[in-house]
Amino acid sequence: QESNTFVAAQTTLDDFRQDVLLTGKGMRERFAAAHHEVGGFFTGLEAAGIEAVPLLAARALPSGPLTAATFDELMARLEACWDRARPLDGLLVAPHGATVGEHLADVDGHWLQLVRRWLGRERPIVGTLDPHANLTPAMVEACDALVAYRTNPHVDQRQRGLEAADLMARTLGGEIWPVQAAAFPPLAINIECQSPDAPPCRPIYELAEEVRLRRGVLSASVCLGFPYADVPQMGAATIAVTDGDNALAGELADELARCAWSRREQFVPELIGVDAALDQLEQPGATTSARRPVCLLDMGDNVGGGGPGDGTWLAAAIHRRRLRGAFVCLYDPQAVAQAVRVAPGQTVRLAVGGKTDALHGLPIEGEFTLRGVFDGAFAETAPRHGGVSAFNQGMTAIVETVDGMTVMLTSKRAPPWSLQQLRSCGLDPASFRILVAKGVHSPLAAYREACDQFIRVNTPGATTADLHALPYRRRRRPMFPFESHAPWDAADGTAFTPAEVK
């Protein structure tokens, strides 16, 4: 789980049950064919003639930190799975890298250290990471090799799972013995700038690709960090994995970190506010009926980053300006319950969105026409962000304002990672002038199919792109860009290399 410490909600075991909470063969049934690293684990091990013994899969949609009871229950289930399965020759693991507990800042580092103690030092642990991981020395020390996804939106998860399985197979076969090092520059990379395909990230990813081709190198990764987890380890990091050469791993991790640090000024974006974004749309010739929809990315209520999904700053501005042909999705089970009391085609007075807290805007009040009611279940077959293929946003009501803004009201929080979200409710994405998606990069994997133009809008909220607006208390200090003159020099070899020489 990606844990946002700036949201009021906490993550409970029910949140995992609603997404993924599986053990044993249930994991194989759910993930073997999925666009997910665990699917890559299964396929890669089978190709190498290695028996896969699935233990535990637990995933929850990003939200607040795990409650202490939830963390304890997950650890108990993990230990029970381990006790039933041992002895094992190695472990493939898939931590997110930015999970936070109510009383524990580094959840992933904790459970990785736990399984390392169970497995022992003589057998390998190889894992995958989300590039939004806030990497820690505990994670690095617990594993022999960690590889991060190289895309954002994350559509290469299965490939990284295959890569991890290949490293495991070669290690068990005695061909290689991976060792790794990591570097931790005091750098928070703004979420708006976290695209591997564009500057300022692209040169770092190009260097990582070149590093992976060097002699003795097994893998190299960039962790962009998750700035919405206010923990001491928050920030960017780099990883290098070599074949038994600790010194080389440290040198390469530092080289990648220097590349990121040298571009730090470029990671401070010029943010576009709500009014400025809508002004662009209202300029003469900005949009015509012949052009495809424009996608407005609501960065302050990024559901994939822990946003509540009911933020109204952007939707309310569209409503005030009476911009026709707009689509907005809002999490609002209360409004859904009211809307379904009338028949399709009838009007109902609603106050939609803005119910989580004042930080994400006020409810939009008015008369809405009900267009349809749906069960909210839909599937996505193509690789999309997060490797998710099955979605369930609960009972869903499609309503429309008198000025032609279409609002999808859902009973469960739903990330905008598939256009099937619209099509399953009888909506054609191409029929709209404006599509509002509550995300930053993650919606693009799906929405590129419908939109040519994307405008990232700096709305207020728990995932605002204005990092200076967030009340950090636990992050490192000094740290760029908060302290603009934060000192750091990797020239003397600052990379963390586990003391244990394999």
Image (spheres, grey):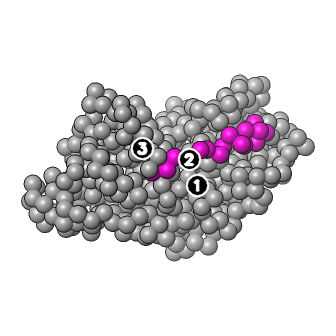
Indicate whether residue 265 is drawn in magenta: yes
Q: Quadrant of residue 355?
A: bottom left
Q: Residues within 10 Å of mark 3 (few under 14, many from 20)?
A: few
Residue type of the residue flagged with mark 3: Asp
* Residue behind mark 1: 466
Alpha carbon separation for disc pair 2 and 3 = 14 Å
Q: Position of residue 408 (x, y in %)?
A: 27, 53
Alpha carbon separation for disc pair 1 and 2 = 8 Å
Q: Position of residue 421 (x, y in %)?
A: 30, 46
* Residue behind mark 2: 271
Is the Cβ of the residue at disc 1 closer than 8 Å to that at disc 2?
A: yes
Along the polypeptide, which appears first: circle 2 or circle 3? 2
Is the Cβ of the residue at disc 2 closer than 8 Å to that at disc 3?
A: no
* Residue behind mark 3: 279
Question: Element type at marker 3?
Answer: helix
The quadrant of the rendering that contains the C terminus is: top right
* Foreground label between 1 and 3: 3
Is residue 123 found left or right of 2 in the rendered image? Answer: right
- Image height of 14 relative to 386, above or below: below
Along the polypeptide, which appears first: circle 1 or circle 2? 2
Magenta part of the chain: 258-274
Q: Which label was assigned to residue 121? A: none
Q: Residues within 10 Å of mark 2 (few under 14, many from 20)?
A: some
Along the polypeptide, which appears first: circle 1 or circle 3? 3
Is residue 14 found left or right of 243 in the rendered image? Answer: left
